[in-house]
Image (spheres, rainbow, N blue to C red):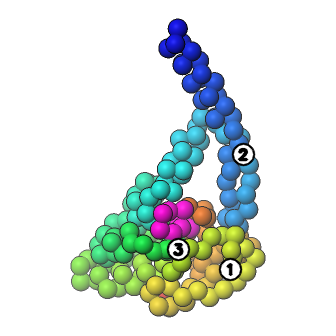
């Protein structure tokens, strides 16, 4: 009898959780509700779990940053990005890396090009934790860890140099990730 009661309670709770509205931010960082379904419930759970990991582990768990993670490893930046931070990382997806001219990524991943790869990757990182709500409606030049300035325009969605932020505010224990659709290069 207790087992049936437990199963009935678990079933009711599952139905309640799946029916709860999900909260999502658009590229401009505005919050919008949507109906939560069984199809998106695991991702929602994954996002909640990801907030407890550092920048590198969050990128690994997301699954769409395999190329970025490989580049971080090749550049010797894993320990840095697992450090205390806080960091704001403009993270190119695997699809963003695929837009690079043929052979570029393979060339950058070679040990003799480690310094060049480090410069490109650290150009995607800003010291501090900058949430989309802090920059909404603004334009700014922000200094990157690489040393150059990155152009951020949050007046119509959010763009970083020539890349668009396609998902904002993925929190990690040592900062935040903003997903971008293009690899940005230092000037």
Residue 30, picture quadrant: bottom right
Question: Do labels 2 and 1 touch, CB within 8 Å?
Answer: no
The answer to whether 123 appears left or right of 115 in the picture is right
Q: Is residue 182 visible?
A: no
38 shown above or below 49: above
Classify residue 14 by image quadrant.
top right
Element under disc 2: strand
Label 2: how many Cα within 10 Å (few below 14, some 14–19, many 20+): few
Residue 178, x across and y down, in percent: 56, 67
Extent of the magenta region: 171-178
Earlier in the chain: of badge 2 and badge 1, it is: 2
Q: Which residue is mark 2?
A: 34
Return the residue at label 3. Answer: 88
Residue drawn where x is 73% and y is 80% of the image: 138
Query: Where does residue 52 sit, x and y in percent of width and height?
Result: 47, 56
Q: Residue at x 60, y 78 (%)?
A: 160
Please tell me which residue is depicted at 39% across the width and 72% down the height of the picture.
Answer: 83
Question: At which x and y percent is residue 15?
Answer: 64, 28
The residue wearing badge 1 is 153
First reached walking from the N terminus: tag 2 or tag 3: 2
Would residue 79 be visible to someone looking at this image?
A: yes
Q: Residue furthest left?
A: 111
Tell me if residue 174 is in the magenta stretch. Answer: yes
Q: Nearer the viewer, residue 77 or 86?
A: 86
Q: Is residue 115 above or below residue 104?
A: below
Left or right placement of residue 156 versus residue 7 in this view: right
Please identify the quarter of the rendering in which residue 105 is found.
bottom left
Q: Mark 3 to mark 1: distance in Å?
A: 15 Å
Observer-side mark, 2 or 3, equals: 3
Q: Between tags 3 and 1, which lies in front?
A: 3
Please state the horizontal and vertical placement of residue 72, each as a whole percent of the image: 35, 71
């Amino acid at each position: 009898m207790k087992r049936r009661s437990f199963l009935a309670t678990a079933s009711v709770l599952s139905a309640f959780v799946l029916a709860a509205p999900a909260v999502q931010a658009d590229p401009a960082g505005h919050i919008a509700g949507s109906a939560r379904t069984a199809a998106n419930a695991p991702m929602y759970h994954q996002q909640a779990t990801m907030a407890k990991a550092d920048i590198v582990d969050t990128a690994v768990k997301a699954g769409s940053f395999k190329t970025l993670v490989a580049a971080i490893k090749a550049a010797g930046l894993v320990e840095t990005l697992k450090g205390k931070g806080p960091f704001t990382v403009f993270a190119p997806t695997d699809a963003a890396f695929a837009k690079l001219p043929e052979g570029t990524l393979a060339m950058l991943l070679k040990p003799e090009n480690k310094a060049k790869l480090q410069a490109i990757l650290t150009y995607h990182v800003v010291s501090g934790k900058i949430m989309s709500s802090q920059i909404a409606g603004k334009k700014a030049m922000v200094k990157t860890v690489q040393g150059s300035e990155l152009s951020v325009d949050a007046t119509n969605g959010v763009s970083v140099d020539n890349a668009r932020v396609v998902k904002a505010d993925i929190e990690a224990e040592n900062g935040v990730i903003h997903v971008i659709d293009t690899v940005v290069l230092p000037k």
